Image (cartoon, rainbow, N blue to C red):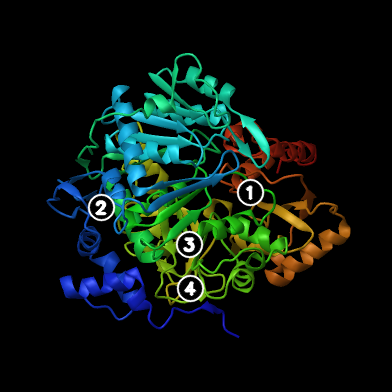
Amino acid sequence: MTDVLWTPPADVLQRSRIGAYLRWLAEHRGLEFADYDALWRWSVTDLDAFWRSIWDHFDVVAHTPPTATLAGRHMPGARWFPGATLNYAENVLRMPGRADDDQVVIATGQTRSSVALTAAELREQVRRVAAGLRRLGVTTGDRVAAYAPNIPETYVLLLATASLGAIFSSCAPEFGTRSVTDRWQQIEPKVLVAVDGYRYGAKPVDRRAEVAAIRAALPSLRHTVTVPYLDPGATPPPGAISWAELAAATDEPQTFAPVPFDHPLYVLYSSGTTGLPKPIVHGHGGILLEHLKMLALHHDLGPADRFFWFTTTGWMMWNFLVSGPAVGATIVLFDGNPGHPDLGALWRLAEETGTTYLGTSAPFLLACRKAGLVPRDIADLAALRGLGSTGAPLPAEGFTWVYDRVGADLQLQSLSGGTDVCTGFVGGVPLLPVHAGEITCRALGAKVEARATDGTSVVGELGELVITEPMPSMPVGFWNDPDGVRYREAYFDLYPGVWRHGDWITVNSRGGCVITGRSDATLNRGGVRLGTAEFYSVVEGLDEVVDSVVVHLEDDEGGAGELLLFVVPTDGVNLDDELRRKICRELRTALSPRHVPDEIHQVRAVPRTLSAKKLEVPVKKILTGTPVDQAAAKGALTNPESLTAFAALAHRRAPDTGSAT
């Protein structure tokens, strides 16, 4: 039985954008490659030639040309395209292959009626909002913050801000006041653009009080602009202006500030679960080149495509999605509850919008599988040729479900990357087959390796995910970190000169990858090291379990320690001894006897970040005696109340052991 679920069509080189790129390399560079592996090895060896080919192949619009491609390869500190000036927004708004009257933005949600923007309308809105920001005194280097969902106004604001050389930052409106101010007090924005509220499913959520608190906590603000999203008839609060006033008609021409390649474009943030979120600064040129490469060559997106990734403005996948027009693709923006009125909502929306590439998360796909959903029966997905999955590892059964229940002919691309690089550095490519449970390849230009504990690169073995050569979309730096100390500590402390990402990865002999969870949450008993993703695949594969989190409490004396499993049972199911025995039996059979938990507890919810990642490390800290407020920043969680159960357990365990361990 083969694990190959999809094979590239025979004419893939004629039909795909990476095929066109290979023809271009042969014609313009005299380079030919036998297969993807040979192309990848060139891309991570001859960095100058590869990244200059991306610049030239995609005909990047620059105001002044670069004097070199890469000024030194040392990390951190590699400088890309010195001397070049360009503007991200100018390159996105070029929208190659699209006519003025082509729809390039389709926006839908649960708060207002669907809207669409043509290429001409998008450019016009950006021109007007840029003029409005200029009237407010915004200039190069100023920060503009958006407390707004995945709607056209947020996208227009990003492009208008970038066009001026100002710096954009967004927080989704479900973020609480503390989460927002922890982020924005660090960057001191001059302008805040905020919605009054939104609908999540059928529920209206008023955010006016939060907006007032955010304004009060940001003394740097000079102007506030309100978008009457929940209540279209609402008037701005005192001291604020409306979006309509910001975007008022004007005769000012659209201009684009020419900025250096590494000029800040936007600030993204780490999850902030165990301290202040790290303000990660991304540059105009690095983001542009990386997204051109990934969207066109890996996702095979172009002017015939409609690109829809379910995301909020608080996740880097939004920044990735909205680069779509730079390769000519139409983007689909959705704001709302993806499970309303049921889990079929996104699949039906894909049909309604003619989506050709749908991006979502592994937890969403697994939830659909667990619910018995058959998307191809509830929606016409004939146009869908690509499906992206990220946010967590997708196990083999998730792959099989996609091909059995969604479509046999689409290409499933499981990918992994991070906010830190605003992209995926392992993912899919049209040239290679899809194997169940496996990320297809390392992305072009991403020198990803698995590193053993002794520092050597390993193949076919679990190791630390490292990147051993610089990429243009690595951060310009962290905000307010002038000597780069925090930046170096975050990625380069363990292996000097090598980026350590914090995931466990296995790279096999054909270049396929399996990521098995965060390296700081790894289970290690009796010398057997296992990523948590495999554990969850077994436990959450049971019909009786909805969600779970596992932690390993090490023994200071060198013993096996304790393995504690917490499960959220399906509605109507209680965790009893019979279910405990079943869970243990499944884990022993699928993994190893060492991974049978010492204790299994029932909880109401697993703590998750605002981008839906499980909080294994804070749970472990709480169970080993760290106070809840020190273990996790509650404002960074979707469900901070979920931590209470772990604190209560730590308290109950402490008298017996002398500590929470």
Residue at 31% over, 74% down: 19
The secondary structure type at the circle numbered 1 is loop
Q: Position of residue 211 (x, y in %)?
A: 53, 24
Q: Where is residue 523 in the image (x, y as percent from the top left)?
A: 62, 57
Q: Which mark is residue 357?
A: 3
Corner quadrant of residue 186: top left
Q: In which quarter of the image is the C terminus?
A: top right
Callout 4, which amino acid? Gly
Q: Nearer the viewer, residue 605 or 151?
A: 151
Callout 1, which amino acid? Asp
Q: Which mark is nearer the camera, 4 or 1?
A: 4
Q: Where is residue 610 in the image (x, y as percent from the top left)?
A: 57, 41
Q: Which of pointers 2 and 1 lies earlier in the amino acid sequence?
A: 2
Q: Quadrant of the N terminus?
A: bottom right
Q: Which mark is nearer the camera, 3 or 4?
A: 3
Give the residue furthest to the front.
101
Q: Which of pointers 3 and 1 lies earlier in the amino acid sequence?
A: 3
* Residue beneath disc 2: 74
Q: Position of residue 187 (x, y in %)?
A: 39, 29
